[in-house]
Amino acid sequence: MEGNRYWDMMRHGRPLSVRHPRMPQGNRAAQFAAYAALSGFGDVIDEAGRMTLQRIEMSESQEEMLDERLNLLYDRLRELPEIKVQFFVKDAKKEGGKVVTLWGRAQKIQEEKLFLIGEKTIPIKDITNLAGAIFEGLE
């Protein structure tokens, strides 16, 4: 290795200054904060690429079936029936939304809202489908 002209430099450790103490690692990282000017830009790109669905308009027959199921559910609320509810949730940041499916026990229907046990409230206008054992035979 003696043929290498940097051999003597490679044998020495990192130089230490008596006048300038070694900078703490947290301060060293702060030097590069200016290069993070585009932080958050990735979140904007992710949000732009996030897909949403448009609210699906139900046919007259689908609305009639849903009304029939809501009426049956209302009549049997004291049984606290277990149901599956599909409903549309509007997106908070962009146009459209998504369809959510929940299983739960129906507690009450009041002021255009369906209440499930566990404090989940669903606006009736957003419900797209109701299913469960109490609706069997209603086709």
Image: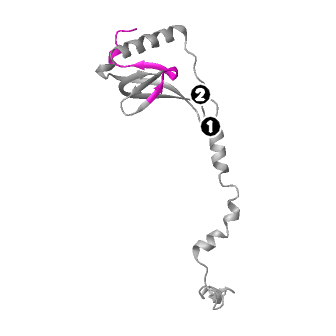
Residue located 37% across and 34% down the image = 118
Q: Quadrant of the C terminus?
A: top left
> Whole-percent x and y of residue 95?
64, 31
> Whole-percent x and y of residue 111?
47, 22
Q: Which residue is mark 1?
A: 93
Q: How is the image coloured?
A: one colour
In depth, the one of 72 and 54 nearer the eye is 72
> Whole-percent x and y of residue 55?
58, 23
> Whole-percent x and y of residue 136?
34, 13
Amino acid type, residue under disc 2 in the picture: Leu
**Residue at the front extreme?**
111
**Residue at the left extreme?**
79
On screen, 74 above or below 17? Answer: above
Q: Quadrant of the N terminus?
A: bottom right
Is residue 125 inside the magenta stretch? yes
On screen, 109 above or below 5? Answer: above
Residue located 61% across and 29% down the image = 96
The residue segment tinted magenta is 121-139
In depth, the one of 15 and 43 nearer the eye is 43
Q: Which residue is mark 2?
A: 53
